[in-house]
Image (spheres, rainbow, N blue to C red):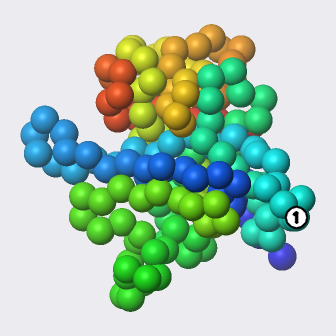
Amino acid sequence: MIHSSGQIFTGKAATMIENGIETTKDTDGYYRTAYKALCIAESPDGSDSGVYGPWVELAAAGNEDTFVGVIGDDTAPYANMDVEVLTDRQPVLGYGKSRSFAPGDVMTIERNGILSVIAGANITQGQYLKLANNGAFQPGEKSDGIGFAMESAKAGERFRATIYAL
């Protein structure tokens, strides 16, 4: 039995991940969601994550070698469900809400697709990407090997990018 396609799998937060799923209003008043980048982290207590995926933390500049993907917003597996808030088995986020993950929380991780992410610096459509701080992305070189921008964005804005599976 396969546990993951390698494009969507689960991970467990090793540290606090503030607004790992970030939802903000755009200039037209529509709520848009962006997902922060993650890197492999050491287990906080030496244990296995127990979720068929690694312990993770927010990505930071220069950590491309441990990059695993971005936080996803899937409902299956039900990793991103907030069962204390939601009782109707809908996706984790209510309309216009962001989501933080405490140490030990399980999350869906996505890669190898076009995903909404956050610019850590000004981005131009077609630029290759590398990691910035706080789970964001910045311009890089093809050799950085983590993705490229599908549209332009200013620092701090949401944009769509092709995020590679490493």
Residue at 44%, 38% (x, y): give it. 117
Location of residue 49 with respect to 165 vertically, above or below: below
Q: Image quadrant for the N terminus?
A: bottom right
> Seen in the image, is 131 located left or right of residue 81?
right
Identify the residue shown where x is 62% and y is 23%: 61
Q: Would you name the residue on which mark 1 appears?
A: 47
Against 57, residue 134 (above or below) is above
Amino acid type at image mark 1: Ser
Residue name at image x 57 percent, y 45 percent = 70
Residue 73 location (% of width, % of height): 47, 60
| Residue 8 seen from this side | no
Quarter of the figure with residue 125: top left
- Percent across and percent down for residue 37 are 57, 40
Residue toward you, 65 or 164? 65
* Residue 62 picture location, percent across and down: 69, 21
Residue 147, above or below 126: below
**Residue farthest to the right?**
46
Residue 47, image quadrant: bottom right
Residue at disc 1, secondary structure: loop
- The residue furthest left is 28
Q: Residue furthest top?
A: 141
> Considering the image in quadrants, where does the C terminus appear?
top right
- Give the residue at x 64% y 60%: 103
Residue 80 sits above or below residue 131 on the image: below
Residue 95 seen in render: yes
Residue 156 appears left or right of 4: left
Residue farthest along the bottom direction in this orientation:
87
